[in-house]
Image (cartoon, coloured by chain):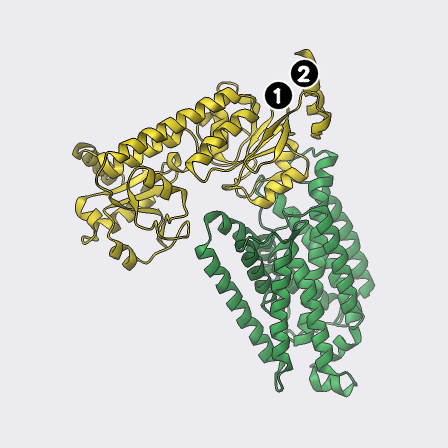
């Protein structure tokens, strides 16, 4: 044990990662198929996306000191706001990351720039890259992150919890006969919706609903209003990031004035706090539950509550 | 045109001294206060070298194009060469072409040269004036930007983020090999331009004036445009679309060292390199830990400075006479 700690200290003071000299090194295969040499228990972890920071926090629990660098908007759990920032996930500050002397950098193909991931690898950092573009990949990502942290068992448990949760939702979906047409709005002015190549498209498919833009081969197409009307969605979900829904209220009003839409007639217009839906962590199960309630099971009472809340927010 | 009141050599030596100082500063400061040698070697040095190469290339290309077109607004941006490079780069990215060499985007180079080839073909038509050639360049610039916008409307959000940063110009991709390559390339193509200084001087006299000095205008012009496009392609593939260096530096130096290209071209190289090294240092440190696109800094500093410079002189021309 002592020997390991000493070699770890040596490694940290050396600053330069030299995997083949590391006595306690072990190999972890990331989702690009690269084998990365890591120390047994990384204690200087940099997470280059909010979702990765959240996953690390889930694994290390109270021992959050091990996380030395996170990106902007890493806000869940709130303790992450105290961790040193290495810039926004799409434009990382490599100098900052390098100066933190990490013994593990977690990166994602879904947000980080490929050039920056390559660059981090080139300057000799132990980078483990995950990919989270489908439910299957997310489960693998959970195991990969767990294994990188030296928590393989916890990683497997989390993945199986996730898979079971998704499976349960799929089964509920099977029991439904209706397949409502859903519009997934991710941006307004110009209107941007989730298309067939987006992750959101998969989430509504799992729930047993139909994305009206599932046939679009683009991840985020920008349709005209006319086109939306012709597809006549029965549910409109307006996604928002962060707690501030004010900008989305205008959207809500806009749709509610379009009486010819089935969604408007049925009163199926919802603002969805998107963080839990777009971040590939265990919270995604909550997010799926949120979507499920919005699309299918909202009782009249909760709906009323929501609209009152929305009105008072104006 | 105010006559230079100091020797051109004074300005070149001053530029070299400032350049050395800014290079030193660029290695000293960054996102972290106490950087170790590896951070300097792996991250700051490549960026500073790339900034020097790109700045040198853009300023020399700007000065050359302004003389060739006898128009003070010419620079790689306005001629469409930069937007051709941008288009090449985003197309390359969307087709999944991994044609990057040490942080340099090869498709950008191809795009820049493609636009130049079009300008070239236009220039071969009889009766083409420099003004119409310039206007063709401006239209190509609009066309290129629009096509980039079309691509961005279809790409996913990651792609858009990447392209946005790239369109604003950034040196954050710098790798040591690519940076040295760019610097050596800029020096080489800069020399290839500099050795034609007599012809550029003659071009300032206008087509008839140049012809009367025994300079054949059309071949000289084509040579200079072609070499400039290589230079621009090289710069854009390394740093994206960085504006104002190609405009600001030559204008500033014409007032200081005069319009003779024997002095102007090397002075542009020195001051272009110096200014971009400084601008990139600002980009890296102004809003830590954010890495501002360096094109934003050159525009923020360059646009007001340019207006200030022009207001200092009511009538402005590229050449001393025309």
| Viewer-closest of A159 and A6 | A159
Q: Look at the picture and state if A186 lies above or below B72.
A: above
The percent coordinates of residue A109 (x first, y second) are: 52, 41
Which residue does the image show at 62% across and 42% down from the upper left?
Answer: A118
Helix, strand or loop at label 1? It is: loop
Q: Are marks 2 and 1 in contact (CB under 8 Å)?
A: yes
Chain in green? B
Of label 2 and label 1, which has the lower sequence position?
A: 2
Q: Which mark is residue B181?
A: none
Does B246 sit left or right of A187 as displayed? right
Which residue does the image show at 54% across and 55% down from the upper left?
Answer: B95
The percent coordinates of residue B199 (x first, y second) are: 77, 77
Determine which quarter of the picture holds residue B291: top right
Residue B73 in view (yes/no): no
The residue that label 1 is drawn on is A40
Does A148 sit left or right of A178 as displayed? right
Does A61 sit left or right of B208 as displayed? left
The percent coordinates of residue A198 (x first, y second) are: 41, 45
Helix, strand or loop at label 2? It is: helix
Chain A visual colour: yellow
| Viewer-closest of A164 and B54 | A164
Q: Chain of mark 1?
A: A
């Amino acid at each position: 044990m002592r020997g390991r700690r000493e070699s770890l200290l040596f490694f940290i003071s050396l600053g330069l990662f030299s995997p083949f000299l590391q006595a306690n090194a072990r190999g972890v295969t990331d989702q690009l198929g690269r084998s990365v040499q890591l120390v047994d228990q990384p204690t200087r972890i940099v997470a280059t996306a909010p979702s990765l920071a959240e996953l690390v926090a889930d694994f290390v629990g109270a021992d959050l000191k091990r996380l030395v660098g996170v990106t902007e908007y890493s806000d869940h759990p709130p303790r992450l706001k105290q961790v040193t920032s290495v810039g926004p996930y799409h434009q990382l500050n490599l100098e900052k990351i390098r100066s933190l002397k990490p013994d593990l950098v977690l990166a994602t193909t879904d947000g980080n720039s490929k050039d920056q991931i390559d660059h981090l690898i080139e300057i000799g950092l132990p980078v483990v890259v995950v990919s989270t573009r489908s439910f299957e990949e997310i489960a693998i990502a959970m195991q990969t992150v767990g294994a990188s942290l030296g928590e393989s068992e916890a990683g497997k448990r989390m993945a199986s919890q996730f898979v079971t949760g998704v499976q349960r939702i799929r089964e509920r979906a099977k029991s439904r006969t209706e397949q409502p047409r859903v519009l997934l709005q991710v941006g307004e002015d110009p209107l941007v919706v989730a298309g067939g190549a987006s992750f959101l498209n998969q989430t509504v498919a799992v729930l047993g609903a139909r994305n009206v833009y599932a046939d679009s081969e683009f991840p985020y197409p920008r349709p005209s209003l006319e086109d939306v009307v012709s597809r006549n969605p029965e549910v409109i979900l307006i996604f928002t990031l962060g707690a501030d829904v004010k900008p989305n209220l205008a959207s809500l009003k806009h749709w509610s004035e379009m009486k010819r839409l089935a969604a408007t007639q049925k009163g199926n217009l919802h603002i969805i706090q998107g963080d839990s839906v777009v971040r590939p962590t265990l919270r995604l199960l909550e997010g799926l539950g949120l979507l499920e309630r919005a699309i299918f099971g909202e009782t009249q009472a909760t709906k009323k509550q929501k609209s009152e809340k929305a009105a008072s927010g104006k | 045109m105010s006559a230079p009141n100091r020797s051109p050599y004074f300005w070149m030596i001053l530029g070299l001294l400032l350049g050395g100082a800014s290079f030193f500063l660029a290695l000293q400061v960054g996102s972290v206060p106490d950087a170790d040698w590896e951070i300097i070697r792996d991250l700051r040095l490549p960026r500073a070298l790339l900034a020097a190469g790109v700045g040198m290339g853009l300023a020399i290309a700007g000065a050359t194009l302004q003389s060739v077109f006898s128009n003070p607004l010419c620079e790689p941006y306005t001629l469409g060469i930069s937007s051709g490079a941008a288009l090449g780069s985003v197309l390359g990215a969307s087709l999944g072409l991994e044609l990057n060499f040490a942080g340099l985007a090869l498709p950008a180079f191809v795009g820049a040269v493609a636009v130049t080839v079009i300008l070239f073909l236009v220039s071969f038509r009889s009766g083409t004036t420099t003004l119409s050639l310039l206007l063709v360049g401006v239209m190509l610039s609009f066309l290129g930007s629009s096509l980039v916008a079309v691509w961005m409307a279809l790409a996913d959000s990651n792609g858009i983020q990447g392209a946005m940063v790239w369109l604003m110009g950034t040196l954050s991709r710098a790798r040591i090999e690519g940076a040295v390559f760019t610097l050596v390339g800029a020096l080489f193509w800069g020399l290839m331009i500099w050795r034609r200084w007599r012809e550029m001087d003659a071009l300032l006299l206008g087509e008839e004036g140049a012809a009367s000095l025994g300079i054949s205008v059309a071949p000289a012009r084509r040579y200079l445009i072609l070499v400039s496009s290589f230079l621009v392609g090289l710069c854009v593939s390394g740093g994206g679309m960085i504006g104002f260096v190609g405009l600001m530096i030559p204008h500033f130096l014409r007032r200081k060292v005069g319009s003779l290209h024997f002095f102007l071209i090397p002075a542009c190289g020195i001051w272009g390199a110096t200014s971009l090294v400084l601008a990139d240092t600002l980009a890296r440190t102004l809003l830590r830990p954010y890495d501002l696109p360096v094109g934003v800094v050159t525009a923020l500093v360059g646009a007001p400075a340019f207006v200030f410079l022009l207001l200092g002189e009511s009538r402005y021309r590229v050449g001393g006479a025309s």
